Amino acid sequence: MLDAAPKVVVVVPTYNERENLPVIVGLLTDLEMPNLHVLVVDDNSPDGTGEVADKLAADSPETVGVLHRTDKDGLGRAYIAGMTRALAEGADIVVQMDADLSHPASVLPTMVETLLGGDAAVVLGSRYVPGGSTAAEWPWHRKALSAWANFYVNTILRLQVKDATAGFKAWKAEALRAIDLESVHSNGYSFQVEMNHRVVRRGLRIAEVPIRFEERVKGASKMSFGVQVESALAPWKLLLGKSGR
């Protein structure tokens, strides 16, 4: 463990999340974790999310930062940009967290403690380990699709994690450097799978802690047919060595 409190940077990609962003920043701030920072990565949201982010940063410059991108080119690209910035600014731990309030901020201290207290390279907030769950509001077909996606990915890639498609993650900085962030090509939800695959290929360990995954309250889901197709093809590309160094 580090002698001083590690610098924890929570990377939050946004696109049309002006209502949710102040809420998530407030929830993270209320944790009162020492040396916790939030980096908002906004993809030129037409609803003014970028301006909201700038206001939050102006009000709390020591805690909140903003990275503005001119194009909306996918969740994976946004995370890569944010993680790269976080590492360049001296982060010891980098956290992936969605802006739609589906990831419980209250579990973040447990994830960081688990990361610092063991040999894991990354800790997932998992729906499918004991104690984890999905929102009751989720329709049966979404639950079935999520369960099938995890079975599908693990059957092909043998990642040996319960929630292979999880998007709430805490990374050790050295693990992100080890997996060569700049060469990650997947986008959308397949980005999560490629990142896990790279960890496993390098003999690093993934740990999981239970979370309750909540349903989005405001805004629209970013899941599209194209994203679903990419996600279905990604494990085969990784298995055949066409991606995932």
Image: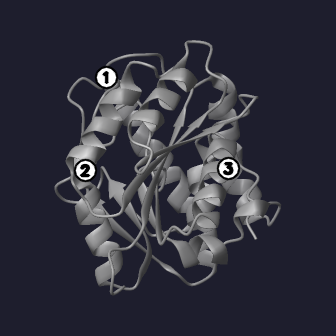
Tell me where residue 170 sits by quadrant. Answer: bottom left
Q: Is residue 74 left or right of residue 221?
A: right
Residue 92 can be seen, yes or no? yes
Q: Is residue 88 left or right of residue 53?
A: right
Q: Measured from the top left, where is residue 29 in percent x and y?
A: 27, 45
Amino acid carrying label 2: it is: Ile
Residue shown at the point (55%, 12%) measured from the top left: 47
**Coordinates of residue 221 in the picture (x, y in percent):** 49, 22
- The amino acid pointed to by label 1 is Pro
Point out residue 77 in the picture as x, y percentages from the top left corner: 69, 44
Report how far apart the C-alphas of labels 1 and 2 lie in the structure: 18 Å
Q: Nearer the viewer, mark 3 or mark 2?
A: 3
Q: Which residue, given by chain and number where applicable, does mark 1 sit on? A: 139
Quick one: which residue is furthest to the top in this view?
47
Q: Which residue is mark 3?
A: 81
Question: Which is more foreground, mark 1 or mark 3?
Answer: 3
Specify few, some or many for label 3: CA neighbours under 10 Å numbering under 14, 14-19, or 20 or more. some
Q: Judge left or right: residue 206 versus residue 134.
A: right
Disc 3, SS: helix
Residue at position x 68%, y 35% in the image: 74
Mark 2 secondary-structure assignment:
loop
Circle 2 Cα neighbour tier, 10 Å, few/some/many (<14 / 14–19 / ≥20): many
Residue 212 visible here? no
The alpha-carbon separation of the residues under discs 3 and 2 comes to 26 Å
Residue at 23% x, 64% y is 110
Question: Foreground: 57 or 156?
Answer: 57
Q: Earlier in the sequence, mark 1 or mark 2?
A: 1
- Toward the left, the furthest residue is 131
Residue that extends furthest to the right in the rendered view of this protein? 242
Residue wearing tag 2: 211
* Kind of residue indicated by mark 3: Ala
